[in-house]
Image: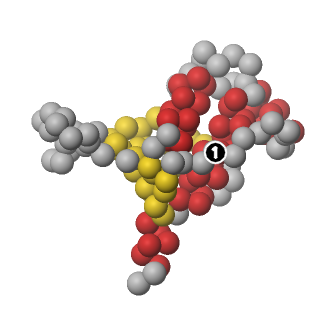
Amino acid sequence: MIFFDTESVGKTGPLVLIQWMNLPDKGRDFLCGDQYGRDTYIHDVWKMPVDTTLNLIKSFTEDEVVGFNLVHDWFVLTKWYNIFSKIGDKNGPPDSSEVRRIEAAGPQPGDVCLKPRSSCDLMLKARTG
């Protein structure tokens, strides 16, 4: 199970950070991370190789995800997954001028709709009572 959050500029602006935490597996050494044995990670998408960001986002689709206002965060991940998948050189950080060109073209045939194995939006749960 993955708890995650995205940080972007405005509601639909550039993705800046992906923060996530994995719930520990049974039998894991609990001497690392917080008091419950969990490790928290921060991924700066503009400093990391594009391929690393794409793999991270794809890994979220293979697990159960939990977030607050998950609709927004999943929209951001899907949008930027599609943008980053069109970048030519995926071995280095994204080039801002290439990203602007891809983003200006808008959605394209072949864009994917990412779906996690299962999800829980804590904001929606909190609103139910």
Coloration mode: secondary structure
Residue 96 in view (yes/no): no
At a point 53% along the width and 25% down the height, the residue shown is 52
Residue 122 in view (yes/no): yes
At a point 42% along the width and 75% down the height, the residue shown is 126
Residue 1 relative to residue 26: left or right: right
Residue that mark 1 sits on: 114
At which x and y percent is residue 9?
Answer: 62, 50
At which x and y percent is residue 91?
Answer: 60, 15
Say which quarter of the image contains residue 96: top right
* Residue 97 in the image: above or below residue 72: above
Residue 1 relative to residue 62: left or right: left
At a point 40% along the width and 47% down the height, the residue shown is 2
Which residue is more in the foreground, 39 or 92?
Answer: 39
At a point 59% along the width and 30% down the height, the residue shown is 54
Which residue is more in the foreground, 124 or 101?
Answer: 124
Say which quarter of the image contains residue 83: top right
At which x and y percent is residue 23?
Answer: 30, 46
At which x and y percent is residue 6?
Answer: 52, 49
- Residue furthest to the left in view is 31
Q: Amino acid at mark 1?
A: Leu
* Residue 24 in the image: above or below residue 127: above
Secondary structure found at label 1: loop
